[in-house]
Image (tube, rainbow, N blue to C red):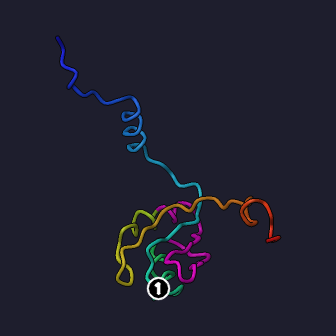
Amino acid sequence: MPSNNSRRPSSINCKRAQHAQEEIEMTTSRLYVGNLSYQTTEEGLKKTFSQYGNVLSINIIEGKGFGFIEMDSPESAEKAKDGLNNTELDGRNIRVDEARPRKEEGRGRPGGRKGRW
């Protein structure tokens, strides 16, 4: 009788592995940069990221430890992501990833009351 202990990869795991092996191209030139030191400046980020292309804008979110950088092209953004993700900047290992699109809905208060408390 065959043993039930033999483990075959499930079709879900196979699809995940196949997806991870495919090269995924970035579709935006906007990057999320996380785990920033509170001492990191816009000038420091510009100097670091400009090695990979022209930096169009930088937005550091005060007191939150993250920010956004817009590069001149998706190709430049991908090069910066590949070159800088999990590297040290100002004493911290930064996380660089493609920024998610902004959500336009849901900007009011929870429950739909929009300021009438």
Residue 100 as seen in the image, left or right of residue 97: right
Query: Is residue 1 depicted above or below 67 in this figure?
Result: above
Q: What residue type is labelled 1?
A: Tyr
Image location of residue 5, percent across then percent down = 20, 25
Residue 14, image quadrant? top left
Q: Quadrant of the C terminus?
A: bottom right
Give the residue at x 39% y 29%: 11
Does the magenta run of residues contain 107? no
Image quarter (top left, top right, bottom left or bottom right) of the N terminus = top left
Task: Check residue 72 for magenta coloring.
Answer: yes
Q: Residue furthest top?
A: 1
Look at mark 1 in the image and give the residue it sits on: 38
Where does the magenta region start and end?
Answer: 53-78
Q: Which of 10 and 111 is in front in this view?
A: 111
Residue farthest right in this picture: 116
Farthest residue, direction front: 117
Look at 22% across and 21% down and name the residue there. Answer: 4
Query: In the figure, 113 relative to 68: above or below?
Result: above
Vertical position of residue 96 compared to residue 25: above or below: below
Q: Where residue 70 appears, x then y in whole percent? A: 59, 70
Q: Where on the picture, by quarter, is residue 2?
A: top left
Residue placed at 51% from the left, 75% from the top? 66
Residue nearest the observer in this picture, 8 or 25: 8
Q: 10 Å neighbourhood of mark 1: few (<14), some, or many (≥20)? A: some
Relative side of 27 to 13, left or right: right
Residue 89 % position (x, y): 38, 80
Q: How many marks?
A: 1
Where is residue 108? Give x, y as percent.
Answer: 76, 66
Label 1 sits on a secondary structure element that is loop
Residue at image location 58% in from the left, 63% down from the top: 29
